[in-house]
Image: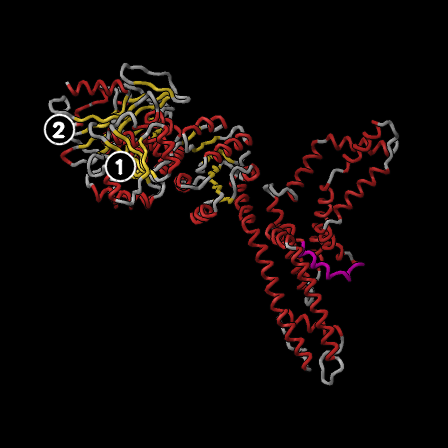
Amino acid sequence: MDKEKIIIFGCNSLSIAVASELKDRVGELLFVAQDKACIESMAEHGYNALEVDYTDDDKLRELGIGQDVSVIFAFSEVDSRNVFLTISARDIDPEVKVIALTQSDDSANKLRAAGASKVIDPYEISGRKIYDMLKRPLIAETIENVVFGQSCLNLSELTVDKDSFLDGKRLGTLELSRHYDLVLIGVVDKELGDEFIFLSSGTDHKLDQGDVLVVVGPPEEIERLRQDAAA
Amino acid sequence: MTLARFIVKHCYRIDDSPRYKRVKRFFYDLIENPRSAIRPYFDVFMILLVLASVFMLMYQVKVDMGEFGTTFELCAVSIFLTEYLLRLWLYNDVHSIFIEHFERAEFVDKPFKLGPPVKEVIRKKWDYMTTPLAVIDLLAIIPSYRPLRFLRLFLLFRLFKLFRYARSINEFAKVLTEKRFEFYTLAIFLAFVVFTSASAIYFFEAKVEGGQIDNFFDGIYWALVTISTVGYGDITPQTTEGRMITLVLIICGIGVISFTTSVIVTAFSEKMNEMRDNRVFAELEKRKGQHIIICGFGRVGQVVAERLFQDRDPFVVIDSEIENVNRAKKMGYLVIHGNADDSELLEQAGIRDKAKQIICLTDSDVSNVYITLTARYLNPEIEIISRANREHTLKKLYQAGANQTVAPFEVVGMIAGEYIGQPVAFEALHGVLSGHEGIGLDTVAVHSDTLLDGTRIGEIDFSANKLILFGVISRREALLDGLTSVYELSDRRLHFNPQADFLLSGGDVLVLIGHRFSIVHFKDSLESGVLNG
């Protein structure tokens, strides 16, 4: 990723978690909040933190929205702020990706209407996780291993390049799981749009250049497939 | 052998007898123990008996029931008498008093005398007999004794016996007794006003020609009828002075009535939460345990409660914020309003023996750690799941005794990280985790001697069932075929991506990805004996 500039609005444990996940992977990371104490502590941790009034469009433009900012995380704890920020950002730059945090189902819909590219409801996900722990401990343990585990299984995406052995193949004849220790979860079929389609929907897809596969497996197997597909 | 020695010997024998204890225990469960299963039946029976006997009493005022009436009365009285004696017997253990005195005498090497222990026994039993409920019981029995027939009116005391058997009446009485001070004040004020106005009206009206007040009692009667705003109008003041007093009395009357009402209302509204909580506890009691305690009804708690409610799993919510409590009530959940770090509250919610899991989901890490610690201290066995809002808290929660933890920030950090590098994989991950499209991981168990037992993976056509095979969880030794990787779970192994010749056997669990309808359909076709339906 070359010209990545990412802005995170809001200062709480969630936005800090995002920041620490991203700090080594993107070009520039900017923290924006209205809480002085938090900004200071973020600055101490080596992050770029600013106090900006998000209601002012000019200030937002100054931050680089509309120019080099590619992703905005609207992570304020107050839903209405996130909605406002999403609308402002969308207004300035129709292309920018906005990922918004929500506290309830209701505001999730509003955020989508405001133009958020993705709405994340961490509390619902946590709630489901607890439910799984209570009622389906095996699933909970598996997900814990696959998704949150350090070394075990990884979820990864793979774009089909021109001339790769995947190009032109039908998913039904691919039999990925027999040749690699990988499970294919789904694809993005460019012929059908940008929508991610779970393999379990049952339709057979023909892979073309630009399609994306999502696979789960041990990292070394994913790497093996990547190499084979590139060759 | 002296009488004293004989009695002591007898007492020791009773003390040692398991049969005696069993019998006493049975009667304790039947009539005293508020938590026993048979007590409610006994209570209902007694309520019906009391009502029936009072009804008979009323009926017999004008109609002679003859033989049947007498027999019924006799039966009822003997049951009341038996109950009374049983309660007297259950109140304390007589033999242990004798034994105690005997042993004390032995210890200080003095001769054992019957006097003091007998005195103590009588004193203890007398203590019981003078409690209000015991007095009511006695009054319900005595008038049936023929020489005391003139006390027949006291048979109505049987109605008071209902206090014993109906919990709600009991609570009503308890609430009112808590406002004793207000009622005293009111009574004194009332007595003062009634007495003053009765004297005044008597003073002004008694000697007036055509006046209706003949004596002081008429004055009291008139004052009470007026102040209570009943106002029959059978006695009316005839003089101007009398009317002036009436005006004052009427205004006082409005004050008295409204004051009484407000005292009663506030007494109940103060007690309402407690009474409601008691109902919740009683409900939990009925469930016989196995419920889940959810501390904190924030967003996460709501999601968990909603799903548990759909499954009809018993659970109780504890939250200290009235807003959340009301929301939970509206959804029809069992709620306790209170602070979950209060050990007493947790105990009442059944943490010691009734609950099987407790989930700490408040948005304060301090509370979560504290609740976890309290819960672990109260019940070393219970499963605790706690929420951490900060990274440092995770370790503390495990130290405090949590079995599992959930961290919203962790989930978000991970998902967000995924979005930047791999937006498509993010889509898959978010879909599976949030379950919005109905697609998720699910399990299908392989039971012994069913269709799947002894089937090879290759024989099952997962894609025809619109499912993706993720792996097989098994208790067996790792089966290595060169490609399948195996991961250790807590007590089993996950065989990720098992190959076609993987042989399923009883006890294995298939982990599948798919829409939940597909999973249901797959399970259904397995039940009906079709493998690739």
Quadrant for the N terminus of chain A in the image = top left
Q: Where is residue A44 in the image (x, y as percent from the top left)?
A: 37, 29
* Magenta segment, prevailing SS (helix, strand or loop): helix
The answer to whether residue B528 of the structure is visible from this angle is: no
What is the three-letter code of the residue carrying label 2?
A: Asp
Q: Which residue corresponds to mark 2?
A: A208
Which residue is depicted at the point 45% across and 32% down? Answer: B385
Residue B252 in which image quadrant: bottom right
Mark 1 crowd level (few <14, some 14–19, many ≥20, 10 Å Cα): many
The answer to whether residue B443 of the structure is visible from this angle is: yes
Which residue is depicted at the point 68% across and 58% down? Answer: B184
What is the three-letter code of the residue carrying label 1?
A: Ile
The reply to whether the C-beta atoms of the residues labelled 1 and 2 are less than 8 Å apart is: no
User: Which span is picked out in magenta?
Assistant: B147-160
Q: In this view, does A24 lie to the left or right of B143?
A: left
Between B442 and B255, the residue placed more toward the observer is B255
Q: Where is residue B523 in the image (x, y as percent from the top left)?
A: 32, 33
Q: Provide the chain ID for the residue under circle 2.
A: A
Q: Position of residue A31 (x, y in %)?
A: 31, 34
Q: Which residue corresponds to mark 1?
A: A72
